[in-house]
Structures are given as structure tokens and as C-alpha cells.
Image: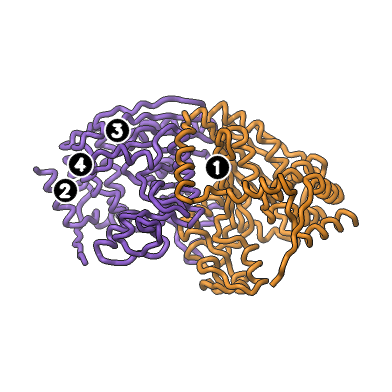
Chain colours: A purple, B orange
């Protein structure tokens, strides 16, 4: 049983640390800038798995040579309501940033628009992207395939990705309604943590290599994760493969496996983002606010509430980071 | 414990029976025509709860006076990628049919388009609508609020609808990939059936009127259904309320309750349909087909497979219908 110690660092120190490591890895300034913003935001919201921890991934990815560190994403005005962005094997965040302006413009002009990002190395959480959309007063829905760790419902081996789906709804004068989750019952990282701690898994999280249900974390790691919500979550996960893979002519999760030639698993794939303009549809923000109020009045939480609370804490106290990770990052920046 | 007997009827007899009852209820020929097509299709695919059984609902709805039986839905070319249809308190199917031509045209011209249907009485399954879209070689995603029977995850009382979401992906030369499900763990009808049979419910289906988990069907009926897939299904259900309610300026599920002045629960609400044109996005149908093949090779089933098998059976043997329902419908048509 591990016991981690944590400490607080300032926003400035976090940014400087990230900048030093990304520069050392030879990411272009533009790429580094969007990545720093993203990772520091995630750290401040205590999404540790998408926070500064990812600097290690991004550093290793750069060293593996599989990622384009200086790519200039190519934004194409593809159709009246479609933006296409070719990330050219570079990080997804700059591709998203470069395409967002035109995407928002099209959504405002036409009511709804979509952006397909192709050939991108995607390591970041989708909530960050859909909240950039709701920050503009628009509604965002984003999804992407990942790596094949998940068996379809009723199946016996890995095929689907953990395929996240994220949604953000702007709330005038308030934080948006945002959800962002894997369409698997759990993240692979959660199973790894329980394996290291010697804990058993909840039922319905995983199957073993024979396709039988298991609560043993070791067996699960060599078997497959299961979709959330049985056949329904599985159907949604397949939809993500279809929309953010086949539809946009990019890789399915299962197609990434044979391409994975390094330990860092830096496979580039696609992402689909759909944006709707509430103003065009005749939105009633009042009814949405009424719904949120009723949900909270029942004692239920809105999704992302944990992130909001962490952000408030971070604004006051600084960014919480594990001492072990901080030491590792400091070392990497210095070496 | 009830034991039902079933028999087979021809397509022609089913159509004639539906036509007689809808004419008697005074639906316009245009409304009746779309409703007959829909109900007979559902019966042929053995979706009994959306099949000829709905003739009773539609008849009672007509008698209650809450539904416009002769409305001519108003289709508006609202924005470059948005169609709006006002169903004028009439049945949703004619509204869908009338708007679909322009919706498909916009999706083909612009890559993506949306249709908002307002003020519609919606009793039909969404798979039928999204398959009309995939029949055109387009991808369809549809959703709508319903009536407030479902508590949000972590909540204690009904607030959300059973909020169905349906998706259809065209498969050249084959039946489309389609899913259509309630975002509740179960349908209210399934709980009612178990109540009548004196059976207990699976865990995680429902809570009692105090907000406590229950497996007792009687307590569940006076309590609330639960969303599928815990907080994730709940978040999706809320998204359906926002997109097909607030966004399009129509009712949330919880707003229908006070308006429900008759036993027939014929509340009109909205629906949102999003259509994408695969040809515009650079689709790879091959990768999608490869995925479906892998899913089936694992012994997992694609969604809607039960419907396809039933359809083949019905084409050969006629439409399966419960003798009790047939008698009731025959009587209603004759009276």
C-alpha cells in the first residue's frame, strides 16, 4: 500500500516547469503554449491524470520520434458546416485551437457545424476542449477513439477504445454544465492502481483473457475492460468509433494496435467535434437553469463539480501535486 | 402469472385494421398514413410496445382532445443547417416526414444539419426515424425528452424523462447499424410487467418514494426509475433534456407533468435530430464493416439484431400479435 505525499506549487512555477520540459523535448513554442495551458488547467482542477503528469508522456513521445513536434496544423474550410484540420501527426491541442475560430464562425452562421481533426496525437481530456466551446456561448460535443482495451458487450476480447465523449452547455454567469467520461466502465489506470494495491475490482468492470467476468485486477489487465452501462454503453462506444473514426476517414481504436511500435503508445487518430449555436435554435436558458436547480435540490451533483471545487482551492492555495512527480519533473527539466 | 396467446396476421390486415381505427379517431389521411407505416413496421419487427398496441393510445389521445388530428406541420428553413418544424400539437411522424427532405438536402449541401421538431405528440420509437435517415445514406442521431419518471443519479425523486437516444449508420448493401434506447436502466413498462407478475426487480433499476434503492416493483412505481450506467447515463439523460428541450425552446420532461390533464398523458414536446453526410467527411465504410465483423466474430451481437430477425420471420409468416390485443383492436374498429 503506497502512501503519497503532496505539496502545493504556484501557477507560475507549474508553467515554467512545463515550459522547460516541453522546450527540452523540442516542441515548437506554439505547440508548447497550448499544451502548457491545458496541463496547468487540468492540474488546477486536480485532474491529475491529465495534468502535469502528462509532461512525462509528452517528453517520451517526443523522444520516440513518432510525433511531429513542430507541425503547423492545416485548417480546411471543407464544407459550409464542416471544418477539417489535419494535425500532421502533431499534438491535437494546437489543431483544435487553430480550427476553433472557423468552427465557431460556421456554427454561428449555420446553427450547427462539425470539426474533424485527423492524424492527431491526443493525450488531453476532452472537457478542456468542449469548455473552450461553451466559453464562446456555444454547445459542444466531442468524441474520439483511443487504444483497444475494451471488449464490446457480449464479446470476449479487446476491440473498442475507452472512447471518451464530452459535452458542454454554456450557463450564462456560471460554470458550464460539462461531462466528460470514458465509455468503458473504468479507466485502465484505475485497474492498474487497484492491481498495485492488491485490491479487487467491482463486478462488471472487466473480463479475463478467456472472456470470463473477473474481479481480479491482474487478470483484467491481460483481459479486457468492459463498456459502462452494458449494451447501451457498448453501443455508444461503437458510435464513437464510427463517428470519430470511420466517418472522418481516420483510424478505429483496433486499427491503432498494429501501428504501435514504441512503448509510449503514441498513436495518432481522429476526433469529431459538433457545435450548436443556442441562439439560433431559440434556446431557453431559464429551463436549463431550472433543471440544474432541481437536480441539486435533490442532493444529486452536477458532473464536473469536483473539478470546480478543486479549481477554487487551487486559486487560493496553489496547485496540488504529488511530491514524487514534482521531483521527477524538476529532475527532467534540469538534466 | 399471465399466459398470452399469439397469432399471425397479414400485412394487409394489419394496415386495414390500423386505418379503420385511425379514421374512426378522425386523424387526417396524411397523419394516419405515416402512423400506419410506423406501427406496422414496428409490429413486423416485433417491437410490440411501439406496434399496433399504440393504436389504443392514439385512439384515446384523439378522444381526449389534447392532440391536433389534422395539423399540417409547418416546416421552416430556419438557418443554413437548421430545419425547424412546428408540429402544431399533432403527431410527430408527419412533422418528421415533412421536414426530412429539407434536412437531408441541408446535410448533403453543408455536411451536417439539425432538425428541431417542436410541439409534437411523440409516441413512436426513434429507431424508425433514424433508419429513414440511414436509408438515404446519411448518419442520424435523434433524441427527445419524455415524461418525468427518472431520478438523476444521486437524486431521490423523478425529474428526468426516460429520454431515448437513437443512432443509425448506413451500411451499403446491408441493414444499418442502429441503436435506440431509453437512458433509464429500464422502461416503466418493464417494471409494470414485473409488478403484475409479482417478480422482483434487478438492483439499480429503481428507488422507492423515500429515494432508497428498491427491488420491489410496487415501491418502484411510486418512486422513480434510475438512469442506465450510473452517473454517465444520468449525464447523457440530462444532455437529452438540454438539447431536445432547452436548446430548441421546448418542454423539459419535468415541465410536462403539470400540463398533464388527462389519463392519456399526451403531452407534446420537442425532438432534436442531427444528420451528418458521410460522403462529405471522407468516410471509410470498409473500416466500419471491419469493426462490425470483429464484433460479431467475438460472439457479441450488434444492436437491433433481434428486430432484423423478427422482420425476416414476419415477412414469411405474417405479423405476430397477441390474440387479446387483436380482439380488442378488432372490436374498436367495428364498434
Residue A227, image x, y percentages: 43, 54
Of circles 1 and 4, the one toward us is: 1
Q: Residue at label 3?
A: A90
The residue singled out by tag 2 in the image is A329
Disc 4: host chain: A
> Which dot marks residue A60?
4
Question: Do discs 1 and 4 belong to a common subunit?
Answer: no
Q: Nearer the viewer, residue A308 or A276?
A: A276
Query: Would you place residue A14 above or below residue A83 in this image?
Result: below
Q: Are marks 3 and 4 on the same chain?
A: yes
Q: Secondary structure at mark 3?
A: loop
Q: Is residue A44 left or right of residue A114?
A: left
Residue beneath disc 1: B177
Residue A246 lies left or right of residue B257; in this view the side is left
Is A36 left or right of B329, judged from the image as shown?
A: left
Q: Secondary structure at mark 1?
A: strand
Q: Which image quarter holds the N terminus of chain B?
A: bottom right
Amino acid at each position: 500500500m503506497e502512501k503519497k505525499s503532496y505539496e502545493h506549487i504556484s501557477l507560475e512555477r507549474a508553467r515554467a516547469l512545463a515550459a522547460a520540459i516541453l522546450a527540452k523535448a523540442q516542441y515548437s513554442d506554439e505547440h508548447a503554449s497550448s499544451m502548457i495551458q491545458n496541463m496547468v488547467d487540468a492540474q488546477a482542477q486536480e485532474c491529475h491524470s491529465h495534468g502535469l503528469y502528462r509532461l512525462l508522456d509528452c517528453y517520451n513521445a517526443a523522444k520516440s520520434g513518432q510525433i511531429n513536434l513542430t507541425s503547423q496544423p492545416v485548417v480546411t474550410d471543407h464544407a459550409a458546416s464542416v471544418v477539417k484540420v489535419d494535425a500532421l501527426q502533431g499534438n491535437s491541442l494546437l489543431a483544435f485551437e487553430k480550427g476553433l475560430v472557423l468552427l465557431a464562425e460556421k456554427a454561428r452562421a449555420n446553427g450547427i457545424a462539425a470539426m474533424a481533426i485527423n492524424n492527431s496525437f491526443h493525450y488531453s481530456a476532452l472537457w478542456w476542449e468542449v469548455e473552450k466551446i461553451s466559453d464562446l456561448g456555444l454547445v459542444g460535443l466531442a468524441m474520439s477513439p483511443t487504444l483497444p482495451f475494451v471488449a464490446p458487450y457480449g464479446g470476449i476480447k479487446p476491440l473498442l477504445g475507452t472512447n471518451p465523449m464530452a459535452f458542454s452547455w454554456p450557463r450564462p454567469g456560471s460554470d458550464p454544465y460539462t461531462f466528460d467520461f470514458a465509455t468503458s466502465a473504468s479507466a485502465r489506470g484505475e485497474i492498474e492502481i487497484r492491481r498495485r494495491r492488491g485490491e479487487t475490482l467491482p463486478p462488471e468492470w472487466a473480463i479475463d483473457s478467456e472472456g470470463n467476468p473477473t474481479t481480479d485486477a491482474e487478470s483484467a489487465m491481460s483481459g479486457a475492460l468492459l463498456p459502462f452501462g452494458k449494451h447501451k454503453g457498448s453501443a455508444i462506444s461503437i458510435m464513437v468509433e464510427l463517428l470519430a473514426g470511420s466517418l472522418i476517414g481516420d483510424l478505429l481504436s483496433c486499427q491503432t494496435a498494429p501501428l504501435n511500435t514504441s512503448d509510449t503508445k503514441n498513436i495518432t487518430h481522429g476526433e469529431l467535434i459538433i457545435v450548436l449555436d443556442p441562439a439560433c435554435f431559440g434556446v431557453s436558458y431559464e429551463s436549463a437553469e431550472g433543471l440544474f436547480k432541481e437536480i441539486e435540490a435533490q442532493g444529486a451533483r452536477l458532473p464536473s463539480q469536483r473539478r470546480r471545487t478543486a479549481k477554487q482551492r487551487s486559486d487560493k492555495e496553489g496547485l496540488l501535486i504529488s511530491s514524487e512527480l514534482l521531483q521527477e519533473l524538476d529532475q527532467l527539466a534540469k538534466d
